[in-house]
Amino acid sequence: MSMKFLLGILLGYLLALFIIFVIPHNKKEFTFPQLELSQVDSIPELTKENVLKEIIKQDIKFPLIVYRQVLWETGHLKCKNCSLDYLNIFGYGWNGKTYHKYIDWRQSIKAYKTWQIKYYKKGDYYQFLENIGYAESKSYISNLKSLDI
């Protein structure tokens, strides 16, 4: 075997190790909070009205923008074969195969609150969502703004 071939294999191996072990650890860690089972005694029906009430109850900043996110991510709470199947109303944890799973849709709002506290500091919330890369779509913000609520 030639030296160039062996060097190419070595570099490929090192690149694979970098992708597997280094890149995932460079992302800021964020853990999704869970509700205790005792808090799940009576789960309210997943309706638009209840979602907005829960967003306000959990003291989420910019509740109407966040509510728009829920509507967009779940197709107005009607999507099929999507994050909603896991009671995940924000599409959290998409890894190309599945979403983060919750036993109660309110957990998803609690996770959003925790995420918001950790990352949002001040300023225009739409700009914050864009800057942090909340969604892959470049039209995400304009889509949110276009929703009639």
Image: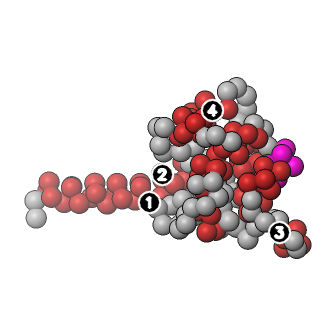
Q: Which residue is mark 3?
A: 43
The CA distance from mark 1 to mark 3 is: 39 Å
Q: Are marks 2 and 1 in contact (CB under 8 Å)?
A: yes
Tag 2 or tag 4, which sits nearer the N-term?
2
* 99, 146: nearer the viewer: 146
Residue type pointed to by label 2:
Ile
Q: Which residue is mark 2?
A: 23
- Disc 1 or 3, which lies upstream in sequence? 1
Q: Amino acid at mark 3?
A: Ile
User: Alpha carbon of mark 3 to alpha carbon of mark 2: how far?
Assistant: 38 Å
Q: Image quarter for residue 56?
A: top right
Query: Which residue is the site of mark 4?
Result: 126
**Which x, y percent locates residue 135?**
53, 45
Q: Is residue 29 magenta?
A: no
Label 4: element kind: helix
Instruction: Relative to 62, say whether 78 is above or below.
Output: below
Vertical placement of 94 versus 145: above or below? below
**Mark 4 or mark 1, which has the lower sequence index?**
1
Residue located beneath label 1 in the image: 20
| Image quadrant where residue 129 sits | top right
- Tell me if label 4 and label 1 are in contact, CB under 8 Å: no
Tell me where residue 67 appears, x and y as whole percent: 71, 46
In the picture, which quadrant includes the N terminus?
Answer: bottom left
